[in-house]
Amino acid sequence: MELLTTNNVWMMICTALVFFMHTGFAFLEIGLTRQKNTINILFKNIFIITVGLLLYYIAGFNLMYPGFAEGSAGIIDFAGFGITPPENGMTPEYADGGYTWWTDFLFQGMFAATAATIVSGAVAERMKIGPFMIFTVIYVGLVYPIAGSWKWGGGFLDQMGFYDFAGSTLVHSVGGWAALVAVWLLGARIGKFKDGKPQAIPGHNIPLATAGVLILWLGWFGFNGGSVLSADPELTSLTLVTTCLAAAAGGVVAAFVSLLKYKNLDLTMFLNGILGGLVGITAGADVMTPESAILIGAIAGALIVFAVAFVDAIKLDDPVGAIAVHLICGVWGTLAVGIFSTNPEHTFLIQLTGVACYAAFCLVSAFLIIFTLKKTVGIRVSEREELEGLDAHEHGMDAYPDFRLNEH
């Protein structure tokens, strides 16, 4: 019972750290966008975590962990509404004595909300709040838990041998694929492309964005550290080491490659490089050597610079770099398990199969949801609302009433 208590306390600490990541996402998103849309972004972030938790309680948890019957196809099942702990939910028999049923629910619930937060940043500054809220309810309530059940719920990809330790694919690219579809259907912000060339639209508070990235890095101690699902000393420590080394390598390489490509020391690229390294290592943080972690992070950092440029080149407008960070690096990190894992059972082909399955499911799901919203209620604010700011028109508030700037 002492071991259960120790493990359970560690898992609750990790749950708190993952919860704190929502502060990091909020700071990063408002920092990299304009002052006139600050309230809008904060509202979306608060909506995601509050409604996400409620949805995960109502149906998400039991959709994600339905207890697939033997012989089941392992694609979709449902264990019922609400959460009722099993008889051994508070004993060492549950989850191999790692933690209790209630802690399990809360830890997984924090992950569920993260997928929609990724989309929030990508659609910033021009998406109507109502349709975004509808999208969040469907994506977090249905799409994410079903996708999660394929691996973490013991579904068909888990049976196949697909591996995703803490969510490079299950969380980050599930959000990233939806972000890609949303950005494409929404179109670019006014002024983003002039004569076909991308124009910089600077964020209003880079210090806040920097704080957001450091908070996210801290939160990753819970994101990856908690995914050990116990307080196992060796595995937890290794996981945190590989996580931090990948983050550091991602940041340094992104800054260096950006310097070579653009001839300046770009802080935002440095920050996104750190996040890219974190996303990249998340799929295999527990099965990597420190050297492999550095290499995975370094490649993720380089990918960030070229992915941001590529997203601009194909005329997609992603204000915070969410597609480059969460989708591209999420896919890379998942495939990296098949290359660098210390477990010989992890193969590149199976990892690629998993990536393809998630891509197909998330692209189709996100398209059906957002396209339907576009054709019915509309997803984009008017030109006037966009120019004057979503804060004033969607919320009737100003984030900084004493420092109002004339922004267009």
Image: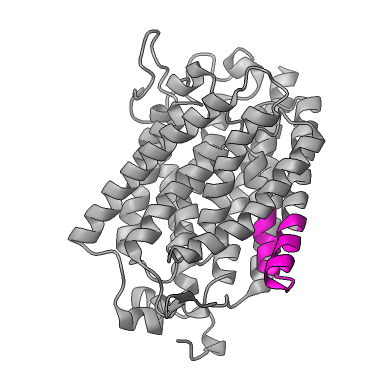
| 131 to the left or right of 83 | left
Q: Nearer the viewer, residue 49 or 132?
A: 132
Position of 344 relative to 404 (above/below): above
Give the quadrant of the N terminus: top right
Q: Residue drawn 50% across and 37% down?
A: 170
The spot of residue 93 in percent (x, y) is 60, 12
Residues in magenta? 252-274
Give the dominant element type of the magenta stretch: helix, strand or loop: helix
Position of 116 relative to 360 (above/below): below
> Visible in this render: residue 99?
yes
The verdict on residue 259 being magenta is yes
Q: Residue drawn 56% across and 63% down?
A: 309
The spot of residue 209 in percent (x, y) is 64, 67
- Picture quadrant where residue 53 is located: top left
Q: Nearer the viewer, residue 298 or 154?
A: 298
| 70 to the left or right of 252 | left
Q: Residue drawn 64% across and 39% down?
A: 282
The spot of residue 331 in percent (x, y) is 55, 41
Of all residues shown, which one is farthest toward the top? 70
Of all residues shown, which one is farthest toward the bottom? 406
The verdict on residue 19 being magenta is no
Give the quadrant of the C terminus: bottom left
Q: Nearer the viewer, residue 40 or 266?
A: 266
